């Protein structure tokens, strides 16, 4: 055999070995199942496909948990992991799922809204495949996801994404972004079906409040805030003022732009009677000029490059040597969510939503996130849902 | 959708053909293989 032939065979063997090695890791990540422990407040569990038949049998068909109170009242929809690389949202949703008791009204939780996005990561950006949260009984392991749905589940992308129904031209990638495909349609792309199903929940179940929980870069101006359209601004403003006064953390209100289509905080309000809110907490991990994208950076938010930029006043949030740890982000979300429910309930007594046994900001910062997760080995197996 | 798979198969075929025809430049051989990997996985529909 010629020298070239030998080189080619060696290269092929090398590439096949790399494909198998990395492929097994990606396969393990994609098929890793996270345990969702349904807490004492959960009264029923549905799949999203109940609201859009086209989702049935697809990876996008995710769990919808209902926490119905003893007394009738209003309804609040809580969506997390719209962007699966912003995990404070998922961690917050699971705290509510495992601990919340509803005295009045109904809380609907979708912990992994873009389930496809949570089953792929960004190896090209050096993202870790998993991250772990320390608890009193061990560690709870989570898949680290991506911003958009996995191209294995929705492909091919168009050259330009034409938003439905407004026909605004958006980036081709955003057709896999469940915060650009609202209000969705039943016969559209897979992610349009996901958002359509959530719209159907809002419309058919007469949901009063829809909260879409996110994280945003410290160098991005829309961070550490509630994004709200005109009809939600009063409640959002009161919530930010109350958490600042009583709990001591900053949170401001950003107006939802009318001309930018496909966003949850825009379309939910335009296509239903539900009041939408989008919650952002800072996540230094997503900033571009950081060191390696490690699990440590994801959890503690400490980065020397961001610290340097903070000293030059280039960031939109306060930032010092303590970073921006996960406890602060999750704690903020816990408090803001409860405060939005409180403010709505004050003005709409007959549609009140009263949530109990969920920690506030100071509790989560003091005890850590893992403190609020229960041991699956000691949990009723019938109340554990894999996703 | 089928048309996209046809395009993928065509590019895979061209890359394999170029890989076979390449006689000297090892860098080019590596590049053909790097580009080939995601396209082959797409064709095989590996999830």
Image: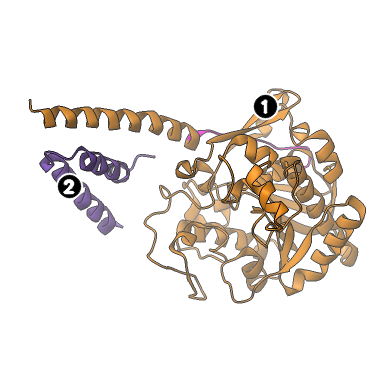
Chain colours: A orange, B purple
A106 or A133: nearer the viewer: A133
User: How many neighbours does mark 1 have within 10 angstroms: few (below 14), some (14-19), or many (20 or more)?
Assistant: some
Rendering coords of residue A151 (x, y %): 42, 50
A15 or A385: nearer the viewer: A15
Rendering coords of residue A272 (x, y %): 66, 70
The quarter in which the N terminus of chain A is drawn is top left
As drawn, A220 above or below A170: above
Which span is picked out in magenta? A31-41
Residue A325 found in image quarter: top right
Mark 2 — on which chain does it sit? B
Q: Residue at x 62, y 48 (%)?
A: A86
Q: Is residue A39 magenta?
A: yes
Q: Residue at x 75, y 42 (%)?
A: A321
Lateral position of residue A35 relative to residue A60, left or right: right
A130 or A49: nearer the viewer: A130
As drawn, A73 above or below B38: below
Instruction: Give the residue at mark 1.
Output: A139
Lateral position of residue A373 relative to residue A177, left or right: right
The quarter in which the C terminus of chain A is drawn is top right
Mark 1 — on which chain does it sit? A
> Which mark, by number, is residue A96?
none
Lateral position of residue A359 relative to residue A62, left or right: right
Q: Residue at x 54, y 46 (%)?
A: A115
Lateral position of residue A252 relative to residue A166, left or right: right
Residue A111 shows up from this direction: no
State the SS at label 2. Answer: helix
Instruction: Give the residue at mark 2.
Output: B13
Residue A230 shows up from this direction: yes
As drawn, A304 above or below A266: above
Residue A312 found in image quarter: bottom right
Rendering coords of residue A243 (x, y %): 86, 55
């Amino acid at each position: 055999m010629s020298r070239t032939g030998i080189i080619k065979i060696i290269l092929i063997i090398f590439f096949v070995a790399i494909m198998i090695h990395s492929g097994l890791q990606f396969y393990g990540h994609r098929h890793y199942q996270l345990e969702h422990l349904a807490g004492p407040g959960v009264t029923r569990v549905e799949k999203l496909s109940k609201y859009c038949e086209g989702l049935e049998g697809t990876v996008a068909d995710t769990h919808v948990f209902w926490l119905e109170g003893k007394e009738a009242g209003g309804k609040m929809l809580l969506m997390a992991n719209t962007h699966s690389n912003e995990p404070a949202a998922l961690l917050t949703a699971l705290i509510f799922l495992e601990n919340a008791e509803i005295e009045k009204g109904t809380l609907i939780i979708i912990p992994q809204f873009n389930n496809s996005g949570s089953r792929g990561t960004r190896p090209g950006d050096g993202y870790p495949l998993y991250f772990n949260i320390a608890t009193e009984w061990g560690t709870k392991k989570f898949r680290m996801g991506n911003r958009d749905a996995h191209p294995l589940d929705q492909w091919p992308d168009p050259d330009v994404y034409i938003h439905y129904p407004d026909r605004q031209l958006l980036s081709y990638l955003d057709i896999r972004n469940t915060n650009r495909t609202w209000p969705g349609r039943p016969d559209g792309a897979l992610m349009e079906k996901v958002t359509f199903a959530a719209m159907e929940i809002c419309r058919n179940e007469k949901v009063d409040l829809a909260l879409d929980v996110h994280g945003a870069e410290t160098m991005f101006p829309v961070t550490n805030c509630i994004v709200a359209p005109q009809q939600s601004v009063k409640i959002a403003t009161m919530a930010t003022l109350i958490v600042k006064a009583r709990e001591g953390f900053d949170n401001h209100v950003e107006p939802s732009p009318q001309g930018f289509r496909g966003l949850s905080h825009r379309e939910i309000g335009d296509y239903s009677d539900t009041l939408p809110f989008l919650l952002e907490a800072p996540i230094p991990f997503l900033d571009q000029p950081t060191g390696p994208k490690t699990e440590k950076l994801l959890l503690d938010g400490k980065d020397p490059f961001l610290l340097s930029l903070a000293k030059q006043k280039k960031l939109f949030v306060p930032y010092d040597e303590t970073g921006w740890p996960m406890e602060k982000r999750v704690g903020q979300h816990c408090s803001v969510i409860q405060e939005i429910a409180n403010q709505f309930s004050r003005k709409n007594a007959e549609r009140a939503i009263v949530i109990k046994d969920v920690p506030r900001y100071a509790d989560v910062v003091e005890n850590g996130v893992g403190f609020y997760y229960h041991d699956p080995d000691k949990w009723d197996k019938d109340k554990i849902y894999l996703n | 959708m089928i048309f996209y798979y046809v395009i993928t198969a065509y590019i895979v075929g061209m890359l394999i053909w170029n890989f076979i025809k390449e006689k000297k430049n090892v860098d080019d051989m590596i590049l053909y293989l790097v580009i080939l990997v995601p396209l082959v996985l797409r064709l095989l529909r590996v999830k």
